[in-house]
Image: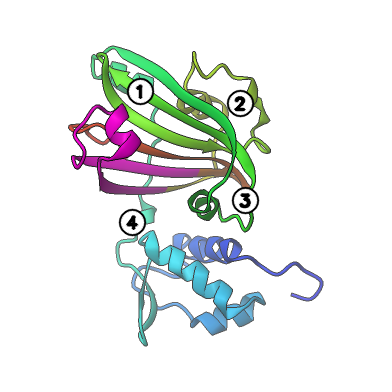
């Protein structure tokens, strides 16, 4: 790659993801060795290793020690996920929707948020915490970061009147989304705002979106017990 900027691990991840999704590497195929990919792309082997770790963590490939890397037979990231407007989701269930802005600050991104966006250094972003309610009961507690460099318009939005969720879905289309689902025990803010007992099981939906190379937002939404996931394949 003479005369070109060396690829980052996120660049390598995106290139390999694209090859898997366009069936250059089909389900069940074995991928080239990390060192061979590094030689092809002109980057360090460690860069490829980090990219492949990420693809493994999101369920697209399976890595085995001394067995190489293989595309999963049923890659989980081939599923599509529709990001709902929470207000419409609540109203579709016949419930009364309400919303509370808990905090709105410009903060430096901590390491977990940097990792989601693939950032090497901390930057400042809009940090929003909010609670969505259904029939006056806690429904979803969201902890969201919005990149204000690529989305400066959100700084003028009155987030006490309209949720960041609704504004972003309506105004900031994305070209790529990473989604994770997992369960956690309620504690701290999640237990407090969802009015549930510490230790109760909560479903967490973690989404990060980009428009091309530009980050849009990453949000961790903790759902109250009894929440039923809305996702469409």
Q: Residue at x 53, y 49 (%)?
A: 110
User: Mark 3 touching mark 4, by CB under 8 A?
Assistant: no
Name the image quarter holding residue 121.
bottom right
- Tell me, for residue 76, which label it has, or none: 4
- Tell me, for residue 132, which label it has, or none: 1
- Tell me, for residue 122, which label it has, or none: 3
Q: Residue at x 24, y 40 (%)?
A: 202
Q: CA distance from mark 3 to mark 4?
A: 30 Å
User: Mark 3 touching mark 1, by CB under 8 A?
Assistant: no
- Tell me, for residue 154, which label it has, or none: 2
Query: In terms of sequence position, does the residue under pointer 1 or pointer 4 come before the other?
Result: 4
Q: Position of residue 213 (x, y in %)?
A: 63, 49
Element under disc 3: loop
Q: CA distance from mark 1 to mark 4?
A: 28 Å
Q: Residue at x 52, y 66 (%)?
A: 16
Element under disc 4: helix
Q: For this rendering, which residue is in front, 16 or 206?
A: 206
Q: Nearer the viewer, mark 1 or mark 4?
A: 1
């Amino acid at each position: 790659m003479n005369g070109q900027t060396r690829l980052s691990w996120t660049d390598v991840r995106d290139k390999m993801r694209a090859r898997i999704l366009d069936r250059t590497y089909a389900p069940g195929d074995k991928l080239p060795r990390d060192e061979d990919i590094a030689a092809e792309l002109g980057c360090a082997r460690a860069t490829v290793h980090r990219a492949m770790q990420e693809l493994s963590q999101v369920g697209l490939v399976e890595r085995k020690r001394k067995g190489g890397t293989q595309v999963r037979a049923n890659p989980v990231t081939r599923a599509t996920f529709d990001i709902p407007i929470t207000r419409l989701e609540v109203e579709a269930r016949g419930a009364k929707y309400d919303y509370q802005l808990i905090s709105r600050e410009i903060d430096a991104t901590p390491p977990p948020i940097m990792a989601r966006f693939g950032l090497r250094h901390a930057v400042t972003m809009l940090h929003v915490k909010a609670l969505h309610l259904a029939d006056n009961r806690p429904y979803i507690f969201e902890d969201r970061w919005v990149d204000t460099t690529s989305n400066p318009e959100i700084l003028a939005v009155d987030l006490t009147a309209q949720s960041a969720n609704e504004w972003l879905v309506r105004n900031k289309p994305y070209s790529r989304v990473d989604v994770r689902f997992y369960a956690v025990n309620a504690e701290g803010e999640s237990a407090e705002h969802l009015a549930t007992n510490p230790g109760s099981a909560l479903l967490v939906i973690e989404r990060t979106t980009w428009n091309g190379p530009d980050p849009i937002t990453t949000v961790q939404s903790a759902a109250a017990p009894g929440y039923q996931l809305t996702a469409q394949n």
